[in-house]
């Protein structure tokens, strides 16, 4: 029984959105696969999206980037977290290598923590990385030039270079300095449009348009209380965000898997992120997005979405007031392109199968 250890960072939900379809595709090819997951994401979320059965254990330390809000990086806190982790870098590597060796996987898959990759190399266990970004490039963008940052960056890059292969889903950052990169197609869970049945169940007007408001899994809240009530439109968002919004529809009341919920909506208001951009494009859902203050991955994500879907940037201030009527009507007036096919999960699963 082959044993895979999947390490999934808890920086937002996009890393899980990339990894889950690949693991589903791999389990289809290898039903006897033994799967262990290291992650600090909520267990209920992991159980909802990953293929059962699997064993869940807390993940290794993975700073990702600390966030001041869903749209802005806390650079000082991020730099401090990396300094703390890398102060005794080899101690951390050896500790995780011992934990990994005791578990005894045949292969490690990291999306996209660098410590599991370094630990796997130290333990002599084959390892792959899978992601549209790597934390070395993100760290360098925000922290290069700070005292000691050159050492941290070098250790980050060495960890990624130790992977037997770095799988890059479409779209992704260039990452040209990393060896053994293999590009695959877009990775997305395929959802189904279940709006009609949900409206029947909840007694709602199926003729209304649903606009999903979702900023990913990073910290931050949004109040829709001052958003205007637009004719024929319902704002779909977490109940805590609706804040007495008369045109609101609580996401929790719909009770659908997220991929089905997204596919059931007529538009999406969000920020640039791999999982939500690619799932929206593959479902044919138009997207309004607010800028993420220079997030390095954003240019590739935006360019791909503009080429394969209907999208438009909105000012961050629009998230406070919700004055989006003209933008939504303009998106809906555009002809819908043929949605891209999410071939990347099958392609990435084939690479994992080669290694296993």
Image: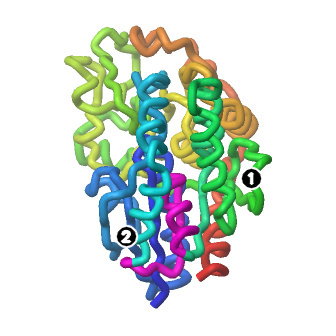
Circle 1 — which element? loop
Is 112 inside the magenta-drawn segment?
yes
Per the rendering, the mark at residue 99 is 2
In this view, the residue farthest toward the bottom is 1
Give the percent coordinates (x, y) of residue 204. Answer: 28, 36
Circle 2 — which element? helix
Q: Earlier in the sequence, mark 2 or mark 1?
A: 2
Give the percent coordinates (x, y) of residue 257. Answer: 36, 53
Give the percent coordinates (x, y) of residue 77. Answer: 41, 27
- Classify residue 320 by image quadrant: top left
Task: Choose between 281 and 169: the one closer to the eye.
Answer: 169
Marks 2/1 in contact by CB < 8 Å: the verdict is no
The residue under the point 57% across, 19% down is 293
Task: Choose between 176 and 250: the one closer to the eye.
Answer: 176
Task: Establish if 2 lies above or below 288.
Answer: below
Residue matched to label 1: 178
- In the shown orientation, is residue 76 left or right of residue 229? right
Magenta residues span: 102-123
């Amino acid at each position: 029984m082959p044993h895979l250890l999947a390490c999934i960072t808890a920086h937002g939900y996009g890393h899980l959105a990339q990894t889950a379809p690949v693991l589903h595709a791999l389990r289809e090819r290898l039903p006897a696969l033994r799967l262990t997951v290291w992650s600090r994401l909520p267990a209920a979320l992991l159980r909802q999206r990953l293929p059962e059965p699997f064993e869940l254990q807390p993940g290794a330390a993975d700073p990702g980037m600390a966030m001041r809000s869903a749209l802005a990086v806390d650079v000082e806190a991020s730099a401090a977290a990396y300094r703390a982790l890398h102060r005794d870098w080899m101690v951390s590597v050896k500790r995780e290598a011992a934990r990994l060796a005791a578990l005894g996987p045949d292969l490690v898959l990291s999306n996209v923590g660098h410590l599991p990759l370094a630990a796997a190399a130290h333990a002599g266990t084959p390892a792959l990385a899978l992601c549209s970004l790597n934390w070395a490039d993100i760290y360098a963008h925000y922290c290069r030039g700070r005292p000691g940052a050159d050492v941290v960056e070098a250790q980050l890059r060495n960890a990624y270079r130790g992977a037997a292969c770095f799988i890059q889903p479409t779209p992704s950052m260039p990452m040209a300095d990393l060896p053994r990169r293999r590009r695959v197609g877009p990775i997305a869970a395929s959802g189904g449009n279940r709006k009609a049945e949900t409206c029947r169940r909840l007694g709602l007007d199926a003729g209304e348009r649903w606009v999903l408001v979702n900023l990913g899994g990073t910290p931050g809240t949004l109040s829709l209380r001052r958003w205007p009530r637009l004719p024929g439109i319902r704002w779909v968002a977490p109940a805590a965000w609706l804040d007495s919004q008369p045109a609101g529809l609580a996401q929790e009341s719909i009770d659908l898997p997220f991929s089905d919920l997204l596919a059931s909506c007529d538009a999406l208001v969000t920020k640039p992120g791999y999982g939500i951009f690619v799932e929206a494009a593959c479902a044919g859902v138009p997207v309004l997005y607010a800028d993420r203050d220079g997030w390095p991955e954003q240019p590739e994500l935006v360019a791909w979405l503009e080429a394969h879907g209907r999208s438009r940037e909105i000012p961050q201030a629009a998230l406070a007031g919700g004055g989006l009527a003209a933008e939504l009507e303009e998106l809906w007036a555009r002809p819908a392109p043929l949605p891209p096919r999410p071939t990347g999960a099958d392609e990435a699963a084939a690479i994992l199968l080669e290694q296993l």
